[in-house]
Image (cartoon, rainbow, N blue to C red):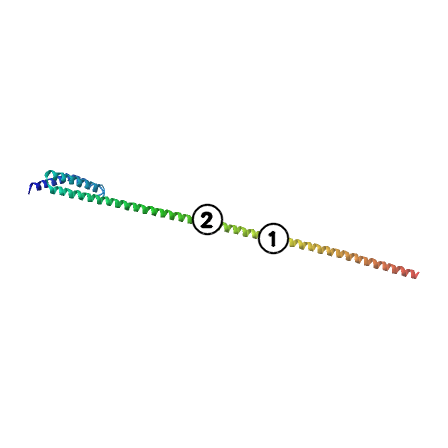
Amino acid sequence: MNPRSVSRAAVGGSLKLLRLPLDLATRALPGRDDGIAAAAGLRLDSVEASLRSVAGGVLGDEHMREDAVRRRRAVDERNLAMTRRKKGKRRVSRAEAHTEERREAADHRRAAADADAERRRAQAERRRRAETERARVAAERRKADAERRKEHAEHALAHEANVERLDATAAESRALEDRKRALAGEEVADRIGELAAAAKRERKES
């Protein structure tokens, strides 16, 4: 094993020892995919890549510097991927929020439409009841008017019949009076004739 390999291994072992407690602490953090834990892990990887690059420069180890470059690129790619995931989640979250807003708006419109329909049904029912009541009142008024007209007609007919009966009675009374007067006149004439005949007989006898 050449000195560079030994130095490389020593640097790697030292960095692992340094990262061990930090890695343990990072695992306890939430969000391993794209949250705090993921960001902390990327930060540690970036710091390790920088330390490897410095160590490679100090030791003149080109392999270590190239490894540091690869690690930094890997960190950048993972960071970019995490950023894209966050953006994707934000887009999904906004889309879900927009969908929820549209659903709530649709629910609100549906509720408003239902309330408006119920209000129209209630108004129609009130109008129907009012029209029914007006029709009932009008029918009762017509019936009462017809009964009053009938009663008035009956009273008028009864009055006319009474007048006719009174007129007939009066006519009969006048006829009886006329007949009585006529009979009385006939009796007077007969009496006068009898008296005249008697007087004539007396004159002949004397």
Which is more toward the observer, 17 or 12?
12
Label disc, if present, on residue 32 of the rendered structure: none
Q: Residue 73 placed where, x, y %?
A: 17, 43
Q: What residue appears at the point 60 percent right and 53 percent down from the top-left corner?
A: 149
The C terminus: image quadrant: bottom right
Q: Position of residue 107 (x, y in %)?
A: 36, 48
Residue beneath disc 1: 149
Instruction: Residue type at mark 2: give it.
Output: Gln
- Residue type pointed to by label 1: Arg
Disc 1/disc 2 C-alpha distance (Å): 38 Å
Q: Quick one: quadrant of the N terminus?
A: top left
Residue at 32 percent of width and 46 percent of height? 98
Q: Callout 2: few (<14), some (14-19), or many (20+) C-alpha neighbours within 10 Å? A: few
Q: Quadrant of residue 202?
A: bottom right
Dot 2 falls on a residue whose secondary structure is helix
Query: Is disc 1 surrounded by few (<14), some (14 to 19) or many (20+) residues within 10 Å?
Result: few
Q: Is residue 140 left or right of residue 125?
A: right
52 horizontally vs 82: left or right: left
Which residue is tagged 2? 123
Among numbered discs 1 and 2, the one appearing first in the sequence: 2
Residue 37 position within the rendered picture, expressed as x and y whole percent measured from the top left: 21, 41
- Please state if 91 lies on the left or on the right of 140 as rendered: left
Residue 167 in sight in this render: yes
- Depth check, front residue: 145 or 50: 50
Q: Are marks 1 and 2 in contact (CB under 8 Å)?
A: no
Name the secondary structure under disc 1: helix
Viewer-side residue, 172 vs 48 = 48
